[in-house]
Amino acid sequence: MTDSNQGTNPYLYALSCISGKWKMSILNHINYYGFIRFSKTKKTFPISEKVLSQQLKELVADGLVERIQYNEIPLRVEYHLTEAGKAIIPALDLIYVWSIHRMRDLDIEIDPDAFVVHPEEKYEGALKKFLDHYDEICAVMEYANDHDLDGKEVLDIIKAHESSD
């Protein structure tokens, strides 16, 4: 991943943080429910205790998840998203939507349980529009950068344009 002369490739770094069969699902599960507990998550996913433990440890080590231990009897442990974990959720959502569309194009059956923490209407609506208009959105963002505009200013321009139509 790193070369002492060239640094770290951002794609490889991101992949190292989210690679693992269950990491993206775990992150989305935490995002949807606000937190998870080990024993309940083990019952939810068809995953071994060893693999779940390893995936959670790696997510904690990468700074995407925080492990909170409550000193109670019985011991209670919760896993919450960190700010970095919350920040990666939109990217995971886009990968998720892309996957749904690609799987449909290839007639690959989609696990119906995949929609439990991904309400389909959200992903079929706003995110599909985002993917469909990605180039235009990038052009708007480039314009905003070139003109030192923040997000609110861009939205104000868009709203003014819509009301003039």
Image (cartoon, grey):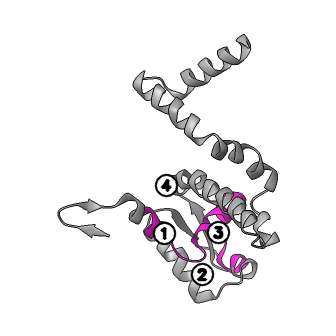
Q: What secondary structure predominates along the stretch shown in magenta?
A: helix
The nearer-to-camera label among 3 and 2 is: 3
**Residue where numbered disc 1 is placed:** 60
**Residue where numbered disc 3 is placed:** 25
The nearer-to-camera label among 3 and 1 is: 3
Q: Which amino acid type is marked by label 3? A: Ser
Report helix, strand or loop for mark 3.
helix
The nearer-to-camera label among 3 and 4 is: 3
Location of residue 146 (image quadrant): top left
Cα–Cα gap, marks 1 and 2: 12 Å
For the residues bearing labels 1 and 2, Cβ distance under 8 angstroms: no
Going from N to C along the chain, the mark reached first, 3 or 1, is 3
**Residue 141, disc:** none
Which residue is situated farthest in the front direction here?
106
Cα–Cα gap, marks 4 and 1: 11 Å
- Rendered position, 24 above or below 48: above
Report helix, strand or loop for mark 2.
helix
Cα–Cα gap, marks 3 and 2: 11 Å
Label 4: few (<14), some or many (≥20) within 10 Å? few
Going from N to C along the chain, the mark reached first, 3 or 4, is 3
Point 52% across, 64% down: residue: 66
Label 2: few (<14), some or many (≥20) within 10 Å? many
Point 65% across, 58% down: residue: 98
> Is residue 132 one of those drawn in magenta?
no
**Residue where numbered disc 4 is placed:** 84
